[in-house]
Amino acid sequence: LSSLLGGIGYFYGKPIIGDSADPTLTTNVSNSLIDASTIEPIELLSATPSRTIFPRGFLWDEGFHQLLVSQWDAKLSLTIISQWLNAMYVYDGPGDRQVGGWIPREMILGDIGRGRVPDEFITQRVDIANPPSLFLAIDSIIDQLLSNLFTEPDSRIIADSLRALYPKLNDWLVWLRHSQAGSFDYPGSYRWHGRSNSDNKIIPNTLASGLDDYPRSPFASPQEQHVDLHAWIAKCSFIMSRLQSVLDIPSDIKYDTEFSLIVSRMNELHWFNELNRYADVGLYNTENRYELVVKFRCKSLSEPPSMVDVQVPLLILNKDTKKEDVAVYCPPS
């Protein structure tokens, strides 16, 4: 706790915001939703993953930071959460259809902040989400409130703070459901946008998910369906229903009903009886065949040298397999 509190800092500046991460894949977020000329400086109070290596705010990390901070000082935690939500860019969709608010994944603010970050990670893309872990801290504070762990004056202050945060939390969840929606062929599905087949990885990274190199489909496509994102949407909807109930907040969106519908759809899309578990849905080869293989990267002998990926049947691999045994699968040149 003391280390985490010592890493809380105040940051100020304008983020650099760019277009969609991969325009070759369909996206539900326009490349021009945010006009760069209208971007205002952000002021942010936030904990940091590391004061020396990552001295800036990370959206995905901050929810877990606040799970701990809120146990020590819930009012401080709500102040920090409020500042993150106030950094949200809210915009309307086509025909004045409200599509919620987007929060940059990393808060790289000002010249000092940018000086610590490789160029390729500085620009924050308008279609890239991050796990909404701040909701977990909100859920924990609701538990404390219902358990009467605060004095009566503090309970009123915390309830009022939660009530004030509700509209921003709603904007965020609306944006997540709109921007990270899956293919129109699979209504009610979700996928992390921003995966690219051109990132030079055997399996494209999914930076938006927080699980960068989690082994998903080796082919990024609009048809993917990501179960972890679907679970996040369900969890956030449940927490919004708790806020509505505990604080008696009227809303056009009945989140208890939404939660039930989202979980039901997750069961339809992601539960596999033969695996006895939930799983992602995606393309695993280009011939619509399913087989157990391991991917290896071969170095070609051409000039200049290049890398070639090959698939090796899993059945031939065991603890005694040598590099030379796999090399026969590499192209001769």
Image (cartoon, rainbow, N blue to C red):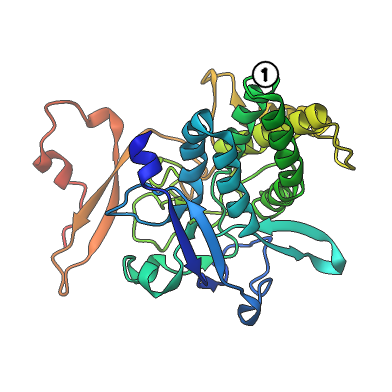
Q: Which residue is mark 1?
A: 148
Image quadrant holding the C terminus, namely bottom left
User: How many numbered discs, if any?
Assistant: 1
Left or right of 33 in this view: 301:
left
Image quadrant holding the N terminus, namely top left
Q: What residue sits 52% from the left and 72% below the top?
A: 14
Q: What residue sits 34% from the left and 65% below the top?
A: 117
Percent of width and height locating residue 323: 11, 41
Name the residue type under label 1: Asn
Front one among 123 and 304:
123
Q: What residue sits 81% from the left and 33% below the top?
A: 244
Q: Is residue 34 above or below residue 48?
A: below
Secondary structure, mark 1, is loop
Q: What residue sits 77% from the left and 48% below the top?
A: 167
Q: Quadrant of residue 265?
A: top right
Percent of width and height locating residue 138: 63, 35
Left or right of 132 in this view: 297:
left
Q: Neighbour class for label 1 at 10 Å: few (<14), some, many (≥20)?
A: few
Can residue 269 be seen here? The reply is no
Residue that sits furthest to the bottom in the current view? 37
Front one among 1 and 114:
1
Percent of width and height locating residue 237: 72, 35
Can residue 203 be seen here? The reply is yes
